[in-house]
Amino acid sequence: MSRKALIAANWKMYKTPAEAQAFVDAFLPRVAGHTRDEIALFPSPVLLPAVVPACKGSNVAVGAQNIHFAEEGAYTGETSIGQLKAVGGTHTLIGHSERRQYFAETDEIVNKKLHTALKHGIVPVVCIGEVLEEREAGKTASVLQTQVNGAFAGITPEAAKPIVIAYEPVWAIGTGRTATPEIAADAHRIIRAEVAKLLGVGVAAAMRILYGGSVKPENVKDLMAQEEIDGALVGGASLKPESFTAIVKY
Ligand code: 13P
């Protein structure tokens, strides 16, 4: 089954609106006409009103790094799915390990957010991955299976079709320590098998599983050579138009 790759930039808490605009001005011409892969940018919410219009009509989609599961309400500091849609965002990350680690997001919260995104037609990129101690204790498979089951509770095979998963081993994020292509592909197989158990082999075979964690222009080609790896979620190396272009055009 051929799956169209998604190469995505997670800018985390970086860039001002002017810096984001400068990135887009430099980046769009470099990737114009690139149709082999889908491309998406995930800036901070305050940047969306600058980045979404700047990318309109291009081959680059724009999404949020996080949304709240409630439609609206007294949730100081949060962004609703309606707000994301109103500014033209089409995608959202859900359950990034930094959200889990620093903002106490659980699989249950991830599941609620996933339901909200699907209900509103926003493409969810659900992030999962083990921490170093779990890998060293031989618990990687069970951690990933638990995260998949938690995230996907109550999701039907029909509803699941837009979902993208990002496998981001926490020990590889921002550390310069990339999973080898083989380690990443092994984890992707575990994840896909769990999705197949829950939603059927057809849905699992069509679902894109991205790899994230110290993806760079130097290692992207070997990672993407793995049939199991359907794209990349890139942090640090997505902040400069030159390096993110090199990753997109691996
Ligand atoms: P780095 O590419 O900086 O390791 O970040 C990965 C990540 O967390 C993407 O979501």
Image: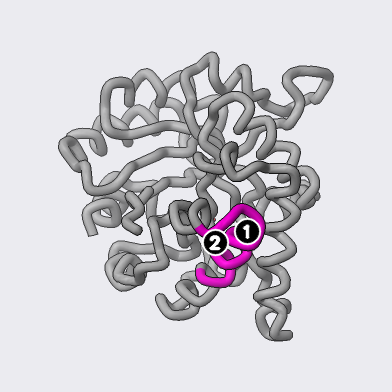
Type of amino acid at the residue the image marks with label 1: Ile
Asked which secondary structure carries label 1, the reply is strand
Magenta span: chief secondary structure: helix
Residue 13: name its quadrant.
Answer: top right
* Residue situated furthest top in the rendering: 86
The residue depicted at 68 percent of the width and 70 percent of the height is 131
Q: Are marks 2 and 1 in contact (CB under 8 Å)?
A: yes
Q: Is residue 226 above or below residue 160?
A: below
Task: Classify 10 Å Cα crowding around label 2: few (below 14), some (14-19), many (20 and above).
Answer: many
- Residue at numbered disc 2: 167
Residue 21 in picture, x, y percent from top left? 35, 27
Label 1 within 8 A of ligand 1 by Cβ:
no
Asked which secondary structure carries label 2, the reply is strand
The magenta segment is 189-201
The residue depicted at 16 percent of the width and 37 percent of the height is 33
Q: How many marks?
A: 2
Residue 157: name its quadrant.
Answer: top right
Residue 97 in picture, x, y percent from top left? 65, 56
Q: Is residue 236 above or below residue 175?
A: above
Residue 248 in picture, x, y percent from top left? 28, 51
The residue depicted at 41 percent of the width and 67 percent of the height is 228
- The foreground one among 165 and 168 is 165
Quadrant containing the N terminus in the rendered view: bottom left
The residue depicted at 23 percent of the width and 60 percent of the height is 250
- Residue at numbered disc 1: 128
Whether residue 93 can be seen here: no
Residue 197 located within the stretch drawn in magenta: yes
Residue 25 in picture, x, y percent from top left? 26, 30
